[in-house]
Image (cartoon, rainbow, N blue to C red):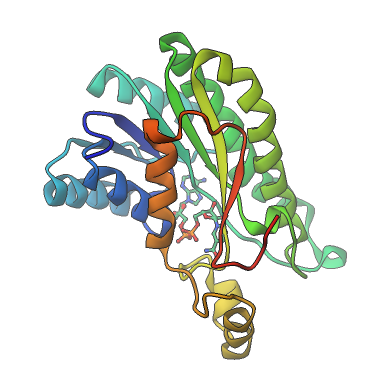
């Protein structure tokens, strides 16, 4: 129960990595605010997690690339719980394509969802955390932030933005006891991950390049998120931590 009584927001938590992190937090005793652009699944997951772990949950559906959603998440969280301790900016999309063919509207879209949302949420929720002199912010980047793949240049650029935004913001927020870090998953078995995993040949290649010898599952990301959300990680600031089974060492 390392997060007992804490209030955590997780964006994009209706499935995949976000859901696994939200479940991990609830298992550790946190009350969890579930956001997702998919309204039905967002409400279902909030209900299921609340019942399974006996914690309070709140569903706030909406598109986190819009400021109105960030404000709504803040206001509804404060109304329900009176405070917020932990923020995980996890919502993200993949629009792959070679740069020469890449559509400008896709570039704008992927940046809005993957990068602008992180700025908006850190600004809105960060205000509350800075004021109360306590907070843990975990932004989900990717190993693509450090080593982009073919047909994923735009995605890699958004994740590099998330990683370096987190580093710079960590210096602004650390004096207020608000820790900002990012986490960099490898190749994860989720809907988004299928761009890399659907082709059996590509899947084999990814297994071969992973020293742990398997593809990551969403639950692999819960432990690091719990640790960074807990007071055990109080002196960890501005890091971009790989959880990739050993693919990258930097
Ligand atoms: N799967 C991988 O291989 C992998 C690797 C590295 C990083 N990541 C990152 O992890 C995060 C989670 O991805 P995942 O693999 O679990 O994907 P996923 O597609 O399983 O889940 C993403 C969730 O985000 C939600 N979402 C999408 N756009 C949104 C928006 N505008 N507002 C609110 N919610 C929105 C989706 O509805 C979905 O429930 C993403 O940021 C992704 O870039 C994934």
**Residue located at (57% from left, 81% from top):** 207
Vertical side of 170 occupied by 241: above or below:
below
**Residue located at (45% from left, 18% from top):** 129
User: How many marks overall?
Assistant: 0
Question: Picture coordinates of residue 210 (x, y %)?
Answer: 59, 75
Question: Picture coordinates of residue 2 (x, y %)?
Answer: 27, 38
Q: What is the quadrant of the N terminus in the image?
A: top left
**From this viewpoint, is residue 56 visible?**
yes
Outermost residue on the right side: it is: 100
Q: 38 or 159, which is in the foreground?
A: 159
Q: Is residue 88 left or right of residue 56?
A: right
Q: What is the quadrant of the C terminus in the image?
A: bottom right
Vertical side of 51 occupied by 150: above or below:
below
**Residue located at (75% from left, 55% from top):** 154
Vertical side of 248 occupied by 139: above or below:
above
Question: Picture coordinates of residue 99 (x, y %)?
Answer: 84, 63
**Residue located at (70% from left, 52% from top):** 145
Question: Picture coordinates of residue 246 (x, y %)?
Answer: 59, 67
Q: Is residue 38 left or right of residue 98?
A: left
Q: Is residue 195 left or right of residue 89?
A: right
Outermost residue on the top side: it is: 131
Q: Is residue 58 left or right of residue 250?
A: left
Q: 230 or 81, which is in the foreground?
A: 230
**From this viewpoint, is residue 155 visible?**
no
Vertical side of 121 occupied by 205: above or below:
below
């Amino acid at each position: 129960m390392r997060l007992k009584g804490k209030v955590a927001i997780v964006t994009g938590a209706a499935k995949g990595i976000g859901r696994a992190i939200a479940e991990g937090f609830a298992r550790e005793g946190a009350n969890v605010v579930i956001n997702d652009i998919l309204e039905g699944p967002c409400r279902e997951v909030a209900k299921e997690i609340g019942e399974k772990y006996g914690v309070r949950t709140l569903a706030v559906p909406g598109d986190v690339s819009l400021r109105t959603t960030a404000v709504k998440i803040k206001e509804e969280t404060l109304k329900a719980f009176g405070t917020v301790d932990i923020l995980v900016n996890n919502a993200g999309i993949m629009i792959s394509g070679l740069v020469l063919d890449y559509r400008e509207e896709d570039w704008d879209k992927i940046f809005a969802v993957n990068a602008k949302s992180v700025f908006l949420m850190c600004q809105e929720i960060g205000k509350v955390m800075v004021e109360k002199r306590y907070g843990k912010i975990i932004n989900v980047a990717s190993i693509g932030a450090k080593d982009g793949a073919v047909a994923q240049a735009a995605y890699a650029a958004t994740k590099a933005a998330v990683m370096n935004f987190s580093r710079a913001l960590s210096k602004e927020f650390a004096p207020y006891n608000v820790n900002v870090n990012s986490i960099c998953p490898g190749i994860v078995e989720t809907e988004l991950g299928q761009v890399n995993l659907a082709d059996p040949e590509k899947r084999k290649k990814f297994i071969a390049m992973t020293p742990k010898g398997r593809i990551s599952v969403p639950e692999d990301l819960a432990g690091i998120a719990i640790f960074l959300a807990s007071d055990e990680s109080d002196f960890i600031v501005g890091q971009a931590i790989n959880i990739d089974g050993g693919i990258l060492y930097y």
